Image: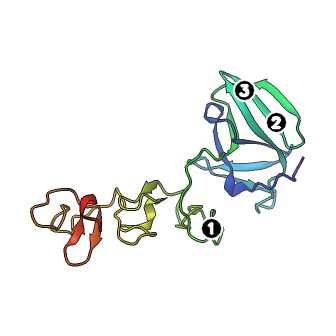
């Protein structure tokens, strides 16, 4: 299965082997493959002409990990168990157990550019944005989306300063609960007053 696994560099992260979980995909690049890893574990393949090369190699589905022993299955059904020390760097495509994140233009963003950017929202930066959950609709999304949720358009995203507001408490009279969203007439509402 050399080169026919369908994974791309944008899906791959370099992590210590101890982070491999069942259903993750372990990529073993073809001999002679050159790649660069940034501080966030994002991986990009390079050719001698300094252009991006396709990700050729073998993809192995992780079946189990017990201590340093890793059991994986290749695309053609071959199962192998071998010792992989916990701190050995490996190339991983996260499995379905990794929490999903809402993304603009599909699961990996719409446009890809030569400069580093978040895979989900396309924000120009080194690596992916920190994932956060909207306080109102609980949709998981990029912290880089700003003050308000990109899905429900009213919920607040944690980690953003709201010092420009006179208060971060619910706007309803005699309610002292923390606000989680913007609302017409009262400006801010708590979970109990979301209607």
Alpha carbon distance from label 2 to label 1: 29 Å
Q: Quadrant of residue 61?
A: top right
The kind of secondary structure element at disc 3 is loop
- The residue pinned by badge 3 equals 84
Alpha carbon distance from label 3 to label 1: 34 Å
Mark 1: few, some, or many residues within 10 Å (few <14, many ≥20)?
few
Left or right placement of residue 158 versus residue 109 in this view: left
Q: Earlier in the sequence, mark 2 or mark 3?
A: 2
Q: Determine contact: label 3, label 1, CB under 8 Å.
A: no
- The residue pinned by badge 1 equals 106
Q: Is residue 193 above or below residue 79?
A: below
Q: Earlier in the sequence, mark 3 or mark 1?
A: 3
- Residue 30 position, x and y percent, is 85, 45
| Residue furthest to the bottom | 185
Q: Nearer the viewer, residue 143 or 116?
A: 143
Residue drawn where x is 54% and y is 57% of the image:
101
């Amino acid at each position: 299965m050399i080169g026919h696994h369908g994974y791309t560099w944008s899906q791959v992260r370099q992590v210590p082997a101890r982070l491999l979980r069942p259903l993750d995909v372990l990529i073993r690049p073809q001999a002679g493959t050159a790649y660069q890893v940034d501080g966030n574990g994002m991986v990009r393949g390079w050719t001698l002409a300094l252009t991006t090369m396709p990700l050729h190699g073998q993809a192995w589905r992780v079946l189990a990990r017990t201590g340093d022993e890793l059991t994986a299955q290749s695309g053609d059904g071959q199962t192998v168990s071998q010792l992989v020390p916990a701190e050995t760097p490996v190339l991983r495509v996260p499995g379905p157990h990794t929490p999903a994140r809402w993304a603009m233009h599909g699961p990996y963003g719409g446009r890809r550019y030569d400069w580093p950017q978040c895979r989900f929202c396309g924000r120009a930066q080194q690596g992916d944005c920190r994932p956060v959950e909207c306080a109102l609709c609980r949709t998981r999304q990029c912290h880089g989306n700003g003050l308000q949720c990109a899905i429900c358009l009213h919920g607040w995203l944690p980690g953003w300063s709201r010092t420009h507001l006179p208060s971060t408490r619910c706007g309803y009279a005699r309610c002292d609960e923390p606000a989680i969203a913007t609302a017409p007439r009262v400006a801010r509402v708590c979970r109990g007053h979301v209607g």
